[in-house]
Image (tube, grey):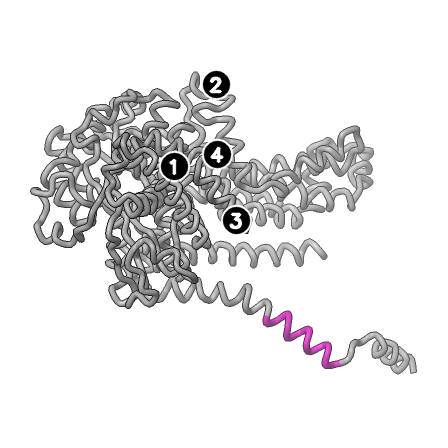
Amino acid sequence: MLFFVQNKYNKGLMPPAWLNWTLVVISLTFLAVFLLLPLVIIFTEAFRQGMTLWWQSISEPEALHALKLTLLTAAVAVPANTIFGLAAAWCLAKFRFFGRNIIITLIDLPFAVSPIIAGMLFVLLFGARGYLRGITDSLDLQIIFAVPGIILATMFITFPFVARELTGLMTQQGSQAEQAALSLGASGWQTFWHITLPDIKWGLLYGIILCNARAMGEFGAVSVVSGHIRGKTNTLPLHAEILYNEYNFSAAFAVASLLAFLALVTLVIKSIAERRKKR
Amino acid sequence: MKIISIIYSLALIALPFGLVSCEKQSEADSLELLNVSYDPTRELYQDYNKVFAQHWLAKTGQNITINQSHGGAGKQARAVIDGLKADVVTLALAYDIDVIAEKTGLFPANWQSRLPHNSTPYSSTIVFLVRKGNPKEIKDWDDLIKPGIEVITPNPKTSGGARWNYLAAWGYELNRQLGNLDKVNDQLYAQEVEQANEKAQAFVTELFDHVPILDTGARGATNTFVQREIGDVLLAWENEAFLSIKELGTDKLEIVVPSISILAEPSVTVVDNNANNHNALAAAQEYLSFLYSPSAQKLIAKHYYRPALPEHADPEDIERFPQLIMFTIDKVFGSWQQAQKTHFNDGGIFDQIYVKGSNK
């Protein structure tokens, strides 16, 4: 009897079958055209002229250097933003203080501004006529049109990922567990390692992965500060553009497929992390 | 705990890459140069760098690596002004190099007299690239403003090639109005020239009404036309037009040579202070003067640029260049400084034309 009532109740909520199917078909078509199709095209174009050419395209010195630079950039930007993000989220989630909302807004700034603004900001600061020129000159440092500029621009762009991801999560969890630990005599570090971190680890991983994906894929800001010197200041996305502009379509798509592959790996790890986070 | 070990292992994987890229730099008997160039010269300098590296090794026993950077000429000049450490600049037109000299003082203002042929080791001109069979029957500049024709050219604000395109179109109409471009510099015809310039402005305004997209550099515009198949005609460097036919096949595109065009003179110079800062001045100077050597001139013609010393090129390469009337910028527009000021600076004629066009 109970079963029957429930079923009837559900039925009333269900839209008619035709509407159901139309919506399913529309969203699936949309997914196929806008997500699946480009992905398939990237890989078919990349392998169109065979496995050997694909391998040559991604193993030639300029491509390898671009790959190294991309990994180096991510290797610096991601840990730096992870540490910053953890600290910021902890501070914002566990304490209420004057200016807290301003800080939250500021953390979102890199999401809000166009990447080209981020790039030009660094040109204005560190360029030959930039505001900080005196300091960089006296230290004999080349910031923009060199690797440090690329890393700085990437850090700026990927700055909010971890902090944003964790602020919400940590606010939700509150600080009772930590307070309990502290009152039972745990030290600050012990509380962090044994109470705070285990609670947020999947959220943290999720933030790191998103941060990493953007760090490796960033184009706009990096393009402004790179100077486009082949084999020196080209990241993988910039290298793909150069190859495309040089009529090397297969090579361009080979590099693009490498980026797409990195993105796919990222997405798989991301969905695992997401599932664990919910648990 | 697991999360920390993941972070550590990621860092450990990335570390060797970082070390490798730091390691490579300090080697005593090798030298690096940075050549900041404009868009279509990529293939030319890729080949030339190899030839020059051999020459330098034979001459001095030193290994040399030349790094390249390419983009729209105006954009590239901007980057050098902002601190891109170019040892030599090889840009699409003299004005962009003038701006670097003026704003940075990294090399003397009289740079253009330091090398033969006004520091122009190769020249080119502006031609039309159309789809195979020339379906819209485009033969000369006045066909570009016929109804329904879409013209592709990059943005004169950022691209040197685009400025040549614009001035070539202007010169065509001026020539048609005056019958003879010699009148431009003759006081007797001052009034006639003024009227002709008004007509020329109207012509160029109408031409830009036919332009659906402005890319920032010549290569971007070529890709818009060739790859994305937008537009009926591409205004292109002669060398760029030849190259796209070579890369993409004669079954898709063909070149149309207009009755008259501009002699486009890309110029080169050493950025003295930058090169001096890492003891590369001699190499940078040799890098540019070697462009005038017989082997380099031959290479230049192979890459579809008109060599300054055609006697060194293969005759069959020279034969590929179509015959057409070419006028110089100095003759029709006074100088690059003047042309830039009148036409392309903020508030110049191009701004008026383009604002008018986009308001329609």
Q: Give the quarter of the image for residue A23.
A: bottom right
Q: Which three-letter amino acid code belongs to the residue tagged 3?
A: Ser
Q: Nearer the viewer, mark 1 or mark 4?
A: 4
Q: Which label is found at residue B347?
A: 4
For the point 48% across and 18% down, the residue is A135
Q: Residue furthest right?
A: A1
In the structure shown, which secondary structural element does the residue marked by tag 4 occupy? loop
| Labels 4 & 3 near each other (Cβ < 8 A) | no
For the point 56% across and 57% down, the residue is A267
Residue B206 in the image, given as x and y percentages of width and height: 43, 51
Spatial CA distance of label 1 from label 3 is: 22 Å
Q: Which three-letter amino acid code belongs to the residue tagged 1?
A: Gly
Q: Nearer the viewer, mark 1 or mark 3?
A: 3
Answer few, some or many: residues within 10 Å of disc 2's Cα (few below 14, many 20 plus, some between 14 and 19).
Answer: few
Q: Which label is found at residue A135?
A: 2
Q: Which label is found at residue B358?
A: 3
Q: Which label is found at residue B300?
A: none
Q: Give the quarter of the image for residue B192.
A: top left
Q: Which label is found at residue B74?
A: 1
Answer few, some or many: residues within 10 Å of disc 1's Cα (few below 14, many 20 plus, some between 14 and 19).
Answer: many
In the structure shown, which secondary structural element does the residue marked by tag 1 occupy? helix
What predominant SS class does the magenta segment belong to? Answer: helix
Answer few, some or many: residues within 10 Å of disc 4's Cα (few below 14, many 20 plus, some between 14 and 19).
Answer: few
- Residue A264, placed above or below residue A190: below
Q: Earlier in the sequence, mark 4 or mark 3?
A: 4
Answer few, some or many: residues within 10 Å of disc 3's Cα (few below 14, many 20 plus, some between 14 and 19).
Answer: few
Q: Earlier in the sequence, mark 1 or mark 3?
A: 1
- The magenta region covers A17-29
In the structure shown, which secondary structural element does the residue marked by tag 2 occupy? helix
Q: Which three-letter amino acid code belongs to the residue tagged 2?
A: Ile
